[in-house]
């Protein structure tokens, strides 16, 4: 078993940490491409119907279909549309996995440890984001724990894990951008950060007013660095088999059913997994 050595603290220039990597060569990654099965389509279809307060029995009613799905009047056409959407979603997932894998591999080359104060800020952001996501779904953290069967300790560990991962990835991208002498202009912010052009000036002005312009610029620079890391990566695609896909979907169905049982009972589900 490899011995893990404690990493040194980074050089601090004010509140800015200076990180380095063990190598700036292209990373090597493997991307898993999901196989779209009929079970995938069933799962997606059931999700759509559930949101509408409907069941598959409604699919036999062509008038109901036409009313709720523009241009669709039969169940098979709806399935074809959903199948296409699921396939597109799986393709996007593979591309997103490519980014996450490449940046994750780059982060393994980080030569310094993240200062505790910086980790605490990332953790606060992770916790706030998670709570806001739950609030948008009409839930508190306590309600989520009751429905999912997760424990408070598991939530806290999730916050710690995601904060450390995000902090190390940002640090690695910062080191990569410095080594490669990457720069960004305000004209690139919108594209790199996914902000509509019409809103970019307002976002920049708000960031400057709040003293967060350097954070905004760093975010754009890191996004540009991530694009470069992915473009240079040695990438192998591994296609999921149909049997593997069925196992994946069955597990997703099981988790959903456990969550729903917890919601209906107002108590604990079992086996909810936090990543």
Image: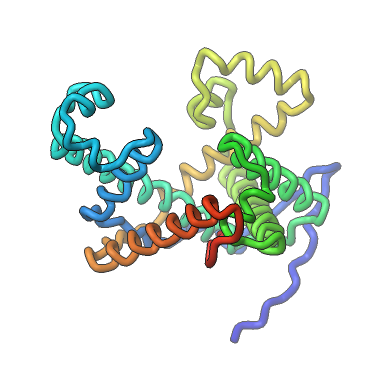
Left or right: where 194 falls relative to 32: right
Quadrant location of the N terminus in the rendered image:
bottom right
- Quadrant of the rendered image containing residue 2: bottom right
Percent position (x, y) of residue 246? 28, 63
Figure quadrant of residue 146: bottom right
Asked which quadrant contains residue 113, the reply is bottom right
Is residue 234 at least partly visible in the picture?
Answer: no
Quadrant where the C terminus sits is bottom right
The relative height of residue 159 versus residue 44 in the rendered view (above or below) is below
Q: Position of residue 218 (x, y in %)?
A: 65, 36
**Rendered position, 75 above or below 179:** above
Out of 182 and 197, give the one closest to the viewer: 197
In the picture as drawn, the residue positioned furthest to the bottom comes out as: 1
Whether 158 is drawn above or below 48: the answer is: below
Q: Nearer the viewer, residue 30 or 74?
A: 74
At 43% from the left edge and 57% from the top edge, which residue is drawn? 257
Residue 150 image position (x, y, % from top left)? 61, 61
The residue that appears at 56% across and 57% down in the rendered structure is 148
Q: Is residue 264 visible?
A: yes
Q: Residue at x 24, y 68 (%)?
A: 243
Residue at point 54% right, 51% down? Answer: 263
Q: Residue furthest right?
A: 14
On the rendered structure, is 162 left or right of 260? right
Indicate the position of residue 154 as horizontal and vertical percent values: 66, 63
Up/down of 261 relative to 62, above or below: below
- Side of 35 relative to 161 (left or right): left
- Between residue 182 and residue 168, name the one nearer to us: 168
- What colouring style does the render use? rainbow
């Amino acid at each position: 078993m490899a011995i893990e050595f404690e990493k040194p603290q980074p050089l601090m220039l004010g509140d800015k940490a200076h990180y380095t990597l063990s190598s700036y060569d292209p990373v090597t990654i493997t991307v898993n491409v999901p196989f779209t099965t009929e079970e995938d389509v069933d799962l997606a279809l059931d999700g759509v119907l559930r949101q509408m307060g409907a069941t598959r029995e409604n699919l036999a009613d062509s008038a109901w279909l036409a009313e709720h799905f523009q241009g669709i009047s039969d169940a098979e056409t709806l399935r074809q549309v959903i199948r296409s959407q699921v396939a597109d979603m799986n393709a996007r997932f593979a591309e997103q996995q490519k980014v996450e894998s490449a940046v994750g591999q780059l982060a393994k080359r980080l030569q310094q440890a993240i200062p505790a104060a910086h980790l605490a800020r990332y953790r606060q952001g992770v916790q706030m984001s998670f709570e806001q996501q739950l609030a948008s779904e009409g839930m508190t953290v306590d309600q989520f724990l009751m429905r999912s069967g997760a424990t408070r300790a598991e939530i806290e560990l999730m916050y710690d894990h995601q904060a450390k991962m995000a902090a190390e990835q940002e640090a690695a991208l910062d080191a990569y951008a410095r080594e490669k002498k990457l720069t960004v202009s305000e004209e690139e912010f919108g594209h790199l950060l996914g902000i509509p052009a019409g809103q970019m000036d307002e976002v920049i002005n708000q960031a400057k007013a709040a003293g967060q312009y350097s954070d905004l610029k760093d975010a754009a620079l890191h996004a540009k660095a991530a694009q470069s890391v992915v473009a240079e990566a040695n990438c192998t695609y591994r296609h999921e088999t149909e049997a593997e896909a069925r196992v994946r979907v069955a597990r997703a169905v099981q988790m959903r059913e456990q969550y729903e049982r917890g919601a209906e009972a107002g108590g604990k589900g079992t086996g909810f997994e936090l990543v």
